[in-house]
Amino acid sequence: MRTVARVEAELGFARPDQVVQDHERAGMLRARTEERGAPEVWDYRTCAVHDMADPDAAPRHLDDAGFEAVDISEIVDLQAALAQVAADDAITETADVALRSALQGVTLRLADGRGLRVDYIADDGLINRRGGPNRLNVNLGGADGRNGHDAAVGIHADQDVFGVPLRKLMDGTAPEVFRHRTPDGTNDDSSTFLLNLWIPIQQVTNPLVFMDRRTLDQQRHQLRYGLPVEGFLDRDEDERVNDIWKFLPDPDQEFWFRSDMGP
């Protein structure tokens, strides 16, 4: 397949007027959470996005860039489960069980030859996103559990190991358990990662874009953010906000996607 070297895309960043000093963690910045029910408004910037499939591009690795592409084409049970999801255009209860069974304990081969074993899949960790071109929402019924989620439009990172809900679920041990780099803490010793696995199922209209974390100034541009999740996740009252990250734009940031991905 012929690849492209780069494209230009509109990426959504946190707005400067959202940024405040963090009163909980000294020296850090955070993005204000909008009032309940208010739509998120992003600062859209046109950014160059490089293609990981470009044969002239240096490979991106999980340990340094923070992401990489892995080949799951020969995991037979997983491919069968994905084919059923594509046919149903939904993750059904049966598909949920099949996907978890196919992934649990599987070792994914990384580009440097090492193996990455899937030890655990979060209870609410399977989400089916559908999005049309030019940010068109094709989920007229809205999100309902695993299904009906629109394409993500803003640059973000899921899960703050020092925040909610991990702090409660793991009694504050998440920073010691998971390998991570955050503005106020780093763990390069652990071999346990907290990761998202993104698998395109239908025709891709909104490719997933990644920031190479080596090009990020965490102290200046990574912002704590409390994401309300009561609209799409079944959580207890004290877990209805997920501590995640938003980002401010900077010309030094470098973005990547992969043009030849399928299930």
Image (cartoon, grey):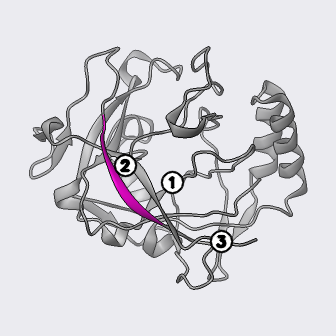
Residue at image point 71% right, 72% down: 2
Element carrying mark 3: loop
Tell me which amino acid carries mark 2: Val
Q: Give the vertical position of 28 relative to 211 (above or below).
A: above
Q: CA distance from mark 2 to mark 3?
A: 36 Å
On the rendered structure, is 96 left or right of 125?
right
In the rendering, at what x and y percent does residue 262 appear?
Answer: 74, 55
The residue under label 1 is: 194
Mark 1: give few (<14), some (14-19) or many (20+) Cα within 10 Å: some
Element carrying mark 1: loop
Q: CA distance from mark 3 to mark 1?
A: 30 Å
Q: Is residue 202 magenta?
A: no
In the rendering, at what x and y percent does residue 116 appear?
Answer: 64, 67
Q: Which residues are magenta?
A: 42-49
Contact flag, marks 1 and 2 (Cβ < 8 Å): yes
Q: Examine the image and state in which quarter residue 224 appears.
A: top left
The residue under label 3 is: 3
Tell me which amino acid carries mark 3: Thr
Q: Which mark is in front, 3 or 1?
A: 3
Number of disc labels:
3
Residue at image point 44% right, 24% down: 229
